[in-house]
Every structure is written in structure tokens, then in C-alpha cells.
Image: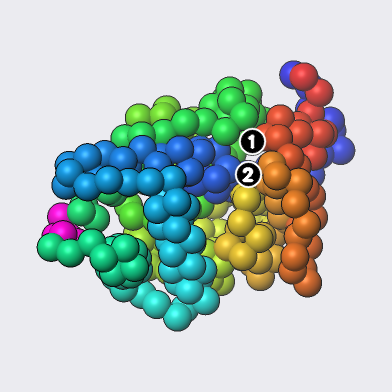
């Protein structure tokens, strides 16, 4: 592997869910495990509907419309109510779901090999919204925590992406102080890319579906498979 001397980046900030790891895979596995525990049927339509409700809650969190506490149980309360599921201990269900998310994982695009290959040339950090215990578990079990130079989790920081407070906290703890030399890579336009833009760092949108942006702001770079990050960075493999 050779690094182009013209490459300006020294530091990479990686999103986890939907970028390095397949969140849909983890979510489905965790939901199936929970519904098996409570002896209730779970259909594909129900999984897709829960995903919509969950995504909506996270978008509302990004906009500051709900708190993390309201999100964690509110998504299940709404989901159960919609399907007439009664008598379920929401807190116990949520805890088992979070445990499942932390133990069930799959890589996107051989992500572990990609980040390992970049260790020689870049400092790499995780920047993620989520529950601290869940994120730490999946990062440890997947081996990603051994590759990264640091991990920033919204629950620990006290603010979620795309909050400027979250990014300011992260940037204060990086060795690199030149924001033009820091690149965030993530699949979410509303948390990763918008957050990076507001923080004044470079942005790379991971868009595996190759869908339209749909927003009035754009990332500096766009990739559809993680291996394309080599081209962005000016690395030859």
C-alpha cells in the first residue's frame, strides 16, 4: 500500500451503525431474539415498521425534539401500541434488545480489513450515536476497538450527532488540530455529514444504495463501497 504524498488527511472519523457495521442485521437479530423470549410472533412487516419508528425517533433526537431517555422506551411503546401488544415489560424488553444489538453484528464491505489497512497512515476514531454499553460491546466483539485510536459515543459525551457540541468535544480530544486534515465517513446525511459540515471538517458520504442526496447540502466525497475510501485518500493498494 502506498500513500500519495498529496493526501492531506491525517485523521479519520468513522460512523459505526450503517457504515462499518450492518445495523439492519443487528436490529433484526435482536428483535427476533426478544420476540422469541416473550413468545410472540414477529413478521417481516412488523420488523420494517419498527425500523421506521426507530429511525424517526433517532431523527427527532438529532433535531433535539426528544431526549435519549424518551427515545429508548418510546419507540417500543409506540410500536407495541400500533400492533396491540399488551402486557409487555417495556424496560425489560429494551434491555434485552440493547444486549442483542451489542452481541449480534456483521461487517459492511469487509470493513475490518479496510480500517486495519489504514492504521499505518492514519489515526482513526469512532464517532457514534447510541447506548454506551451496546456500542462498546459490538466494537469489542467485532475487533474494531483494537484498531481505533479512540471512541466517542454520544451517550458518554452527553450530546448526539450532528450537534456541534458533540463534534467540538471530539475535536478537542484529537491530536490533529487542523480541521481540513480531518475526514468523517458515514452513511447518514443528517448526523454524520451535516455534523461534519457544521464542525468545519471534510465529509465523505457512504451511500451503498447509490440513492439521491435529498438535502440542500452535500458531502465533499461520496462512496458506494468502503474500499473506495482508498481513492478518496489517495492510497494505492
- Relative placement, left or right, of 233 versus 111 is right
| Quadrant of the image containing the N terminus | top right
The x, y position of residue 157, in whole percent, is 39, 63
Q: Which mark is residue 155?
A: none
Instruction: Estimate the spatial distance between the alpha carbons at disc 1 and disc 2, rounded to whole Å.
Output: 7 Å
The quarter of the picture where the C terminus appears is top right
Of helix, strand and loop, which one carries label 1?
Answer: loop
- The answer to whether residue 192 is visible is yes
Question: Which numbered marker is on residue 12?
Answer: 2
Question: Quick one: label 1 or label 2, which is nearer the N terminus?
Answer: 2
Q: Residue at x 38, y 46 (%)?
A: 43
Which residue, given by chain and number where applicable, does mark 1 sit on? 122
* Dominant secondary structure, magenta: helix
Quarter of the image holding residue 234? top right
Location of residue 217 in the rendering, given as x and y in whole percent from the top left corner: 77, 68
What range is drawn magenta here?
88-92
Q: Answer whether residue 102 is visible to the viewer in this image.
A: no
Element type at marker 2? strand
Amino acid at each position: 500500500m502506498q500513500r500519495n504524498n498529496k493526501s492531506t488527511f491525517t485523521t479519520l472519523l468513522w460512523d459505526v451503525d450503517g457504515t462499518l457495521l450492518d445495523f439492519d442485521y443487528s436490529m433484526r437479530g435482536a428483535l427476533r431474539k426478544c420476540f422469541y423470549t416473550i413468545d410472540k410472533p414477529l413478521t417481516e412487516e412488523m420488523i420494517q415498521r419498527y425500523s421506521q419508528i426507530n429511525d424517526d425517533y433517532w431523527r427527532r433526537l438529532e433535531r433535539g425534539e426528544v431526549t435519549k431517555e424518551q427515545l429508548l422506551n418510546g419507540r417500543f411503546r409506540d410500536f407495541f401500541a400500533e400492533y396491540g401488544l399488551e402486557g409487555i415489560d417495556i424496560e425489560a424488553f429494551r434491555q434485552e434488545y440493547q444486549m442483542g444489538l451489542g452481541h449480534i453484528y456483521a461487517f459492511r464491505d469487509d470493513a475490518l480489513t479496510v480500517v486495519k489497512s489504514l492504521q499505518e497512515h492514519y489515526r482513526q476514531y469512532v464517532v457514534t450515536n447510541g447506548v454506551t454499553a451496546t456500542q462498546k460491546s459490538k466494537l469489542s466483539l467485532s475487533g474494531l476497538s483494537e484498531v481505533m485510536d479512540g471512541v466517542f459515543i454520544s451517550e458518554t459525551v452527553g450530546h448526539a450527532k450532528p450537534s456541534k457540541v458533540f463534534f467540538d468535544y471530539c475535536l478537542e480530544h484529537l491530536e490533529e488540530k487542523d480541521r481540513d486534515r480531518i475526514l468523517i465517513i458515514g452513511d447518514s446525511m443528517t448526523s454524520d455529514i451535516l455534523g461534519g459540515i457544521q464542525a468545519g471538517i471534510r465529509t465523505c458520504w457512504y451511500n451503498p444504495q447509490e440513492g439521491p442526496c435529498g438535502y440542500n447540502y452535500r458531502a465533499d466525497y461520496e462512496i458506494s463501497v468502503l474500499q473506495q475510501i482508498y481513492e478518496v485518500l489517495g492510497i494505492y493498494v
